[in-house]
Amino acid sequence: MENQTTVSEFILLGCSSDPQMQIFLFLVFLVIYLITLVGNMMIMVVIRADPHLRTPMYFFLFHLSLVDIYYSSAIVPKMLVNFLAEKKTISVNGCLTQMFFIFLAWSGTEIFLLSAMAYDRYAAICDPLHYVEKMNKGICVQLVSGTWTIGFFYALLNTVFVLRLHFCGLNQIHHFSCELPPLLHLSCIETLTNQVVLLTSIVILGTSSFFFTLISYIHIISTILRIRSAEGRHKAFSTCSSHLIVVGLFYLTGFIQYTKPSSVSSVVLNEMFSIQYSILTPMLNPIIYSLKNKEVKTAVGKILVKFKSLRFFLNRSPQNCG
């Protein structure tokens, strides 16, 4: 083992090796990335611009959009570069950095943001009389700060244990990004400790967040079902349906990816699930929230009207000056 050369870079073999297919995939993922950036930035701008959206729910949605931009940007730009490059490489340090940011954005921050949003809906629907007290500005800031702190320590914990590994010989990662599971297969020393740390942290953080969200929605749904009028039930459910869809997509694909047995594992299957939760979900979140949320659609409409009015004024200004 001592005679093997220490690896200084990894080769990412994800998606396809066909040159024509890579150009096609480059265009597809470029469009997805642009939609992700524009959609999430639009949500953030709308929330900041409209005073009616300065509520706890939209405060959390603002940070969810920020995390989605951050998460997608940690993966897709390098992926796009590799589609056009002859040698699809990433340095060891670059790989570890990307892995840290993936853990920080997805495995820590986003899942607890979704839990905070579930608690917000629980407080709004199940205890509306005390909603303002339970979800005041200080509590919302503490919840968001807590999600980033948990995500940071979760990412740091797993990254520190990866630093103890030694990579030699094989340097091909059958994936489009530096996620931890495929990276562990390339280590020249045992990875049992890393696997235990990864599994333990996923079980503790993932299940705690999931069950917190699940319990919140059990109370929410039971409260909605007790509402007598159909219109009242529809109105109550519409306030949390967008979040429920996002939670379902996120947890389902992520849970299957990280808990499925190795006997059913395959490169194509791993990439499909990873593309869903790491690339498609950040794109779908703003679409789901904007299409399913009447307040967001109204706010977007107001901004578009103001933009058209401003453009009309600017186009007429030179004539008026003359």
Image: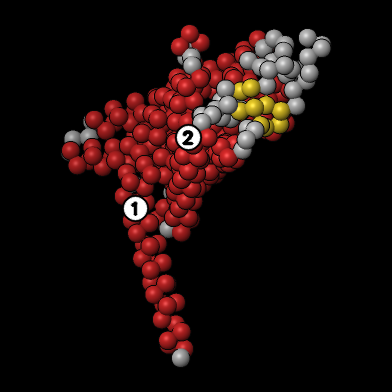
Whether 191 is drawn above or below 32: the answer is above
Whole-number angstrom distance, CA of label 1 to CA of label 2: 37 Å
Q: Position of residue 169 (x, y in %)?
A: 72, 16
Residue drawn at (71%, 28%) of the image: 9
Kind of element beneath mark 2:
helix
Q: Which residue is mark 2?
A: 21
Marks 1 and 2: which is nearer the front? Answer: 2
Residue pointed to by mark 1: 297
Q: Earlier in the sequence, mark 1 or mark 2?
A: 2
For the residue pair 189 and 305, the one nearer the viewer reads as: 189
The N terminus: image quadrant: top right
What residue sits 37% from the left and 51% below the top?
Answer: 296
Checking the image for residue 321, the label placed there is none
Residue at x 42% of width, y 72% of height:
310
Residue furthest to the bottom in view is 322
288, above or below 7, in the image: below
Relative height, residue 64 to residue 307 (above, below): above
Q: Is residue 93 left or right of residue 261?
A: right
Q: Is residue 230 left or right of residue 281?
A: left
Toward the viewer: 128 or 100? Answer: 100
Q: Amino acid at mark 1?
A: Lys
Identify which residue, 265 or 204, lies in the foreground.
265
